[in-house]
Amino acid sequence: MPSAAIIGAGLIGRSWAIVFARAGWSVRITDPDSETLGKAPSLVREGLKELARHGLVTNPENASERVVAVPSLAEAVSGADLVQENSPETVEIKRAIFAELDRLAPADCILASSTSAIVASHFTEGLSGRARCLVAHPVNPPHLVPLVELCGAPWTAPETLARAREIYESVEQVPIIVNREVEGFVLNRLQGALLAEAFRLVGDGVVSPQDLDKTLKDGLGLRWSFLGPFETIELNAPGGIADYCDRYTGFYRRLSEDPAKPDVWDKENVSRILEAWGQTPEPDALARRSAWRDKRLAALKAHKHSQPDQ
């Protein structure tokens, strides 16, 4: 049975534990916070049960039994085939953890980071085993949103990337290869561009934040749940992508000449958005909303599984 070590038992770490456990892997999860670690197995079990309710796991009890919480990095990585690191998003923390992982993990074990934006060269350069290190950036929560961005440092071995791709595909994720290091990788650069324009439109009073959200969830998001932007524009003009570009290049050029500026993130604009959005829910309400989101994602995932790609 292959073995995964999950470093960090927060939202992303627990979700990764679900991914590997449902695929038949042995999972050892650890966290420096004993309370967080103690809660992890039961939360993983609940996540697997929710997947089972949508037909996405056949035996959630057996899967949950494959997840074991352990108190140290050394115990977590012992005999591991892959390490999935989920520590806080700072270079210093990741550099320290990867130094320990490189020292403790088996020589043939892949060391992958879930970092959302930090490229691997910033925290793996000095490692003797740096050729086995890469970023494997998921989408939250990875057990429900399967994309994984694989991005190596300049010294990451090609066979590391190839093997990582095989592993993530084998556990029913959807890996993509980011060919060179860019901050934020692909998904967050796309998301950042959309968010910046959303912050500008709402901050300038063009649209309310609630109506902007409807534009995505009841507009673009419906298509984007099964078509990417290139596929979308190919179907939006009789002659495909080239025809679409001939028709709409002028409009998009004008938009590109006046992009959203960094000041959309300034406190003044953020304050306007918060005032338009309304009161921030209490933590319990946010937790209930997150649970609702996960149920809807599970239902959407089950639907997509039931439909052919073409």
Image (cartoon, rainbow, N blue to C red):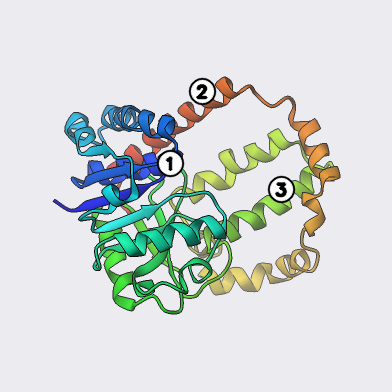
- At a point 59% along the width and 24% down the height, the residue shown is 283
Q: Using the image, tell me which numbered label, if any, was put on residue 198.
A: 3
Mark 2 residue element: helix
The residue labelled by disc 2 is 288
| For marks 3 and 1 on the same chain, the one whose residue lies earlier in the sequence | 1
Q: Is residue 135 left or right of residue 241?
A: left
| For marks 3 and 2 on the same chain, the one whose residue lies earlier in the sequence | 3
Query: Image quarter for residue 162?
Result: bottom left
Mark 1: give few (<14), some (14-19) or many (20+) Cα within 10 Å.
Answer: some
For residue 52, above or below residue 161: above
Mark closer to the observer (3, 1): 1
Q: Using the image, tell me which numbered label, if any, was put on residue 32.
A: 1
Mark closer to the observer (2, 1): 1
Q: Gap between marks 2 and 1, in whole Å?
A: 26 Å
Image spot of residue 44 (x, y percent): 32, 33
Q: Gap between marks 3 and 2, in whole Å?
A: 25 Å
- At a point 45% along the width and 69% down the height, the residue shown is 124
Q: How many marks?
A: 3
Choose between 254 and 108: the one closer to the eye: 108
Choose between 305 and 289: the one closer to the eye: 289
Image spot of residue 90 (x, y percent): 57, 55
For residue 190, above or below residue 207: below
Q: Is residue 73 left or right of residue 216?
A: left
Image spot of residue 210 (x, y percent): 69, 33
Q: Amino acid at mark 1?
A: Pro
Mark closer to the observer (3, 2): 2
For residue 230, above or below residue 191: below
Q: Amino acid at mark 3?
A: Ala
Choose between 122 and 198: the one closer to the eye: 122
Mark 1 residue element: loop
- At a point 66% along the width and 69% down the height, the residue shown is 247
Q: Is residue 144 visible?
A: no
